[in-house]
């Protein structure tokens, strides 16, 4: 096997395996049978089939697979070796530096607890276990952040895609296996992105693509913690690579790869519900090929609808409270989706009807010959300039509308005080969104991205570089919306996760395209190949300097350590017949699902209106149910009225710092204690 074929195949393998796993695990979960034996029994043949369909090539591929948009040169082995080395180094670094967020404070720990329940029980929802507390009582309830109490059960927040993947790690290695799945997914993203760069820019640029993504702080951040972005990136990049490969095939091979590409892109919705926004351009793309009577359009649409439909089915059956919580943003997204579907159908009809199709095609040809492509290139640069100047003319604020909004306001005010900023908790800092991008990929890469976007829109409107049509549409569509409204609490590095899903990989792709275009232009001036290699490496190195300056400190910073050991000790201190009643707010928020899921003990919390007499009544009901009541809180004084206080958890660690107007750096201290009292215990 030559270097080009190896690079093209290996870089899509992780995405294909992820598609196969989700295709098997979701039906099992919905049937309440997500257990290791049936999952592996189904996964192995499905994975073999998906890999065979996604990797098989026609007789022409050995010659063409080595080529890319940048040229027809043979792929050197050094490029393949460099991609593998960067991926391996990234994986090792991230495994060593991985965090242990399992105590629920933000999304990573919520995903860990979701995955822990799936790995151990294989079904949803999570039962309340009211019988362990003597039945329903007006002063106790069972929900906590990211775990809704709904229809007599606990329903985890978020879509099930990532927990289904993390549960596989849980089966293999327990809690540490769940946590180490995040670095593995991140390394797969680096590898897959290198493959997409090889296809669209050129194989010799693949190592640069892998290095840029691997060193970007948001990529480091989301792959040290259990975030949903890495599997979404993997499906996105893999889907685009498969779509590129389908264009280089013929007949049924092309159709089946297009189907797998559409399926991978559609399954993003199973991982992130806002992935529905990202894949909307695929609908129009598939419709365009259907209008041209190309079967690839039907197969792409079929895969997309199957994947996205599976995600929506899971959301509206197993994650309904989460979607209800997102109603204000989800309802407009569903409306936009309906409009685009109707518009795509109308486009197909108009293009296939001769009375309208012929004039439309003539108009398209006239646009390609005219000045519109050049004007679109200029407009692209002006739009990015507008985002850069946005802070001079706009300050984005959002008055709180819910209890969660009020909590975010208080949090932002706290960070503002720490950083010495004017205190205004309604500030969203969204006007700085393009500046955030510049922090993480550096001004040189951002400028090259602007050039690349301008060059590509001109080419596409001229009918050139058709392989870029779908990637360009998805990148521009999503990047514009994210920059306009990031829709996330604006502290960093937390907010950087909104950029890593598509904005940063997409702009890096544009930047590398522009760099390759510049190198080809310079080569025409007559420089020697050796001078060109030195100049290219130097240029890439200079572009990497600001990236490393931002992420350098974070690369060697360890946070969220020792949580697993602390929780294991806590669980060991709770007797098997205990029923845990948490009487303090923050401890209930952080530990209710930890106790229920990782310790395997029934857990409930008291309402804010509960009195000591109410708590004692609950204690009596627990005893009547034949179980041992345990009162839990953050301080000894809070449990002392009910028995002798015993500290069962003490954690002193570091967490990522929080910044609002500058790149993130440094850490904050994090200390937690958990105390219990067993009523009647001497």
Image (cartoon, rainbow, N blue to C red):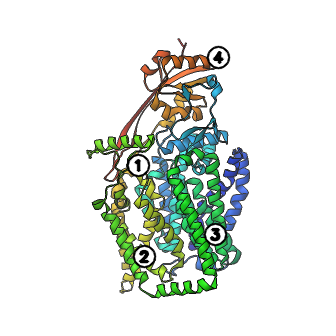
Give the image quarter of residue 559. Answer: top left
Labels 4, 2: front one: 4
* Disc 1 element: loop
* Residue 367 at x, y percent in the picture: 47, 84
Q: What is the distance, in whole Å, between disc 2 and disc 1 at their CAs? A: 36 Å
Q: Which mark is residue 300?
A: 3
- Do the residues bearing badges 2 and 1 touch, measured as CB atoms within 8 Å? no
Query: Mark 3 and mark 4: span between their CA atoms?
Result: 60 Å
Q: Is residue 205 visible?
A: yes
Label 2 sits on residue:
516
Mark closest to the chain's N terminus, 3 or 1: 3
**Left/right of residue 426 with respect to residue 310 in the rendered view:** left
For numbered disc 4, what is the local secondary structure?
Answer: helix
Which residue is nearer to you in this view: 527 or 309?
Answer: 309
Task: Classify 593 as above or below 36.
Answer: above
State how far apart marks 4 and 2 are (Cα).
74 Å
């Amino acid at each position: 096997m030559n270097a080009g074929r190896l690079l093209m195949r290996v870089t899509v393998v992780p995405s294909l395996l992820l598609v196969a796993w989700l295709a098997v695990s979701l039906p099992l979960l919905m049937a309440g049978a997500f257990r290791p034996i049936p999952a592996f029994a189904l996964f192995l043949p499905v994975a073999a089939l998906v890999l065979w369909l996604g990797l098989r090539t026609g007789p022409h591929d050995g010659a063409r697979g080595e080529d890319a948009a940048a040229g027809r040169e043979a792929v050197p082995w050094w490029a393949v070796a460099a991609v593998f080395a960067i991926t391996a180094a990234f994986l090792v670094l991230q495994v060593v530096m991985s965090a242990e967020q399992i105590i629920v404070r933000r999304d990573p720990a919520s995903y860990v607890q979701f995955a822990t329940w799936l790995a151990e029980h294989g079904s949803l929802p999570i039962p309340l276990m009211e019988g362990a507390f003597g039945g329903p009582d007006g002063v106790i309830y069972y929900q906590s952040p990211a775990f809704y109490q709904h229809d007599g059960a606990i329903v985890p927040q978020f879509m099930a895609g990532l927990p289904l993947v993390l549960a596989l790690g849980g089966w293999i290695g327990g809690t540490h296996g769940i946590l180490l799945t995040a670095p593995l997914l991140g390394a797969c993203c680096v590898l897959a992105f290198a493959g997409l760069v090889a296809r669209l820019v050129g194989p010799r640029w693949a190592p640069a693509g892998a290095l840029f993504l691997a060193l970007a702080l948001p990529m480091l951040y989301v792959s040290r913690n259990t975030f949903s972005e890495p599997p979404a990136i993997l499906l996105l990049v893999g889907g685009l690579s498969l779509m590129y490969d389908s264009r280089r095939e013929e007949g049924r091979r092309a159709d089946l790869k297009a189907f797998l590409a559409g399926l991978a892109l559609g399954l993003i919705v199973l991982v992130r519900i806002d992935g529905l926004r990202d894949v909307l351009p695929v609908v129009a793309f598939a419709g365009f090929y259907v209008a041209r009577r190309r079967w690839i359009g039907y197969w792409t649409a079929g895969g997309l609808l199957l994947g996205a439909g599976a995600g929506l089915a899971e959301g509206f059956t197993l994650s309904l409270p989460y979607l209800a919580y997102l109603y204000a943003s989800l309802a407009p997204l569903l409306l936009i989706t309906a409009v685009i579907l109707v518009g795509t159908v109308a486009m197909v009809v108009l293009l296939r009807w001769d009375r309208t199709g012929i004039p439309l095609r003539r108009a398209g040809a006239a646009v390609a010959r005219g000045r519109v492509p050049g004007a679109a290139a200029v407009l692209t640069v002006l739009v990015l300039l507008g985002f850069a100047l946005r802070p001079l003319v706009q300050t984005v604020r959002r008055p709180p509308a819910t209890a969660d909004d009020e909590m975010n306001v208080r949090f932002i005010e706290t960070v503002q005080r720490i950083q010495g900023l004017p205190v205004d908790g309604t500030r969203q800092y969204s006007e700085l969104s393009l500046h955030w991008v510049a922090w993480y990929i550096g001004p040189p890469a951002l400028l090259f991205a602007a050039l690349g976007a301008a060059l590509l829109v001109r080419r596409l409107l001229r009918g050139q570089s058709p392989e870029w049509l779908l990637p360009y549409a998805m990148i521009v569509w999503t990047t514009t919306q994210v920059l306009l409204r990031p829709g996330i609490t604006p502290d960093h590095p937390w907010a950087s996760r909104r950029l890593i899903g598509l904005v940063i990989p997409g702009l890096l792709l544009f930047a590398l395209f522009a760099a390759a275009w510049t190198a080809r232009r310079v080569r025409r001036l007559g420089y020697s190949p050796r001078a060109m290699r030195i100049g290219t490496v130097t240029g890439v190195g200079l572009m990497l300097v600001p990236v490393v300056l931002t992420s350098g400190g974070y690369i060697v910073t360890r946070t969220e350590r020792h949580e697993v050991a602390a929780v294991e000790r806590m669980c060991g201190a709770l007797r098997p017949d205990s029923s845990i009643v948490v009487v303090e707010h923050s401890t209930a928020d952080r530990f209710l699902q930890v106790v229920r899921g990782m310790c395997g003990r029934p857990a409930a919390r008291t309402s804010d209106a509960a009195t000591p007499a109410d708590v004692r009544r609950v204690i009596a009901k627990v005893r009547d149910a034949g179980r041992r009541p345990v009162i839990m809180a953050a301080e000894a004084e809070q449990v002392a009225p009910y028995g002798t206080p015993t500290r069962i958890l003490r954690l002193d660690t570091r967490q990522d710092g929080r910044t609002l107007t500058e790149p993130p750096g440094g850490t904050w201290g994090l200390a937690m204690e958990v105390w219990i009292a067993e009523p009647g215990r001497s």
